[in-house]
Image: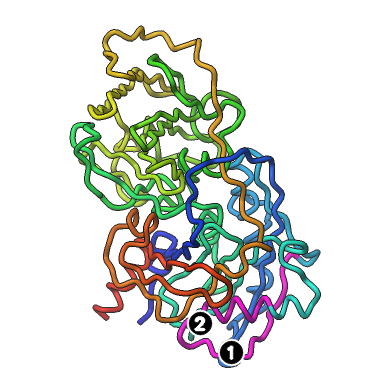
Amino acid sequence: MKLSALGRIALATGIAVLTTATLPGTPAAAAPVKRKILPVLVEFNDASFQFPDKVKASTPDTYFGAKSDSAASYLSELSRGQYTLVPAVPEQFLGPIKLDLSAAGCPQGKINQMTREELTKRGLVAGKDYESLSIVFPAQKTECPWAGLATLPGPTTWINLYGTASGIDVVGHELGHNLGFGHQGRVKCTGGNLGACKSGGASHTTIMAGGYRPAGFSAPEMIRAGWLNGGASLKVTKSGVYTLRSLHGKGSGVRALDIALGGDRLVIEYRHAAGNFDAKLEGVHAYRVPKGSYGASSLIDTTTADKTATNNAPPNADAITKLTDKASKLSVAVVSSGGGQAKVKVALNGDSLAAIDATPSKSASPTPSAATPTPSASASTATEAVTDDSEPDSDLGSAELAAAGGRSTTLPLAAGGGAAVLAAGVGFLLLKRRRKRA
């Protein structure tokens, strides 16, 4: 069966390998990072790139090109220069390297193991010479049901390449998994009542969940990465009116509110076109962060018209106007939104929204929400390999799969202690259904 380009991407068609340290809930301060990534082209004893010269020519542009859709440019703009990808070798990539391995059966664990062995033979040491490894291989005979695979969090991505170049929708999505971001879900909360929510699919406000490249990452993900520091993320500890600037773009100001919600957190952001992001997103959006795991957040949707990257719903279709949670005695209301700025009322401890002065609070001191530093490659080599019988057997939504693995099989690692969980996102489920119909 042949798949269209859109079908192959299918919400970046990512599958994330969740390690036992997945999505830690206690962020720690993060300094600006220059991360050495090594793209490696590999071939099999029964499968090679159809157009190897074109693949070799496109690889440096995909990862390090000057255009905004290269992985390096994309992450640098999103992080406002706090996270930069740099080539681990002067040539910017290696290969193609021929592995003595059949492509059949999608042997991702063996591909990773044998690629690292080949790098060791060349004198390249994980954690020293390279910190992240991106393995690119021809898709024709692998039968892998995904376009990309990644450790979550971790140092490794697998790119199952159709054609001659992958693109940022796949590579950026998988690198997001490496940073600790799951497949972000959506919860439907009727009338803004946070005590009456149910799962509702993918958020579509991030490249991790159907938002594709123009959506970038959401505020909880950027908190997880440590990119909303220096007062860009404000932990709200008193009732008041707070001013938000757009989440993306240059300049200073508060980009996210981080509010206690029982044992969870509530993150509020304002989306507005800035730089290369959010041309089709507008308004104040809210996310529930389970037990402080910012990489496992879910969009709070109080509306009936879901915004996706491909439909004609207005840019503010999923924007909130008011939220209430009786259990935590919390209320939130949007005072104004538009033109690159929003004002949001927050009432804590049962305070009345009506009693709060509409003037933005001046007394609150920003407390940056930072993030767990990106794991080093040298400490993570044993967390990636899984056996080939690990296909998820569940049609659970992306939030459950990304956060907890749903009903996915828990497997022993190929090397080292602990266990890994293979979690499939929405894209994989779409492809799986198509194959059953074919």
* Residue 157 image-quadrant placement: bottom right
The picture places residue 437, in percent across and down from the top left corner, at 24, 78
Q: Quadrant of the C terminus?
A: bottom left
Q: Residues within 10 Å of mark 1 (few under 14, many from 20)?
A: some
- Numbered tag placed on residue 65 in the rendering: none
Tags 1 and 2 in contact by the CB under 8 Å rule?
yes
Q: Which residue is mark 1?
A: 101
Q: Is residue 97 magenta?
A: yes
Task: Decide which of 98, 328 is in the foreground and name it.
Answer: 328
- Residue at (52% x, 29% y) in the render: 233
Q: Is residue 162 magenta?
A: no
Q: Is residue 4 above or below residue 111?
A: above
- Residue at (54% x, 77% y) in the render: 414
SS assignment at label 1: loop
The picture places residue 221, in percent across and down from the top left corner, at 48, 44
Q: What amino acid type should be assigned to the residue bearing mark 1?
A: Leu
Whether residue 362 sits left or right of residue 209 in the image: it is right
* Residue 134 image-quadrant placement: bottom right
Measured Cα–Cα span from mark 1 to mark 2: 9 Å
Whether residue 162 can be seen here:
no
Magenta range is 92-116
- Residue at (66% x, 86% y) in the render: 98
- Residue at (37% x, 43% y) in the render: 290
Q: What amino acid type should be assigned to the residue bearing mark 2?
A: Pro
Q: Which residue is mark 2?
A: 107
SS assignment at label 2: loop
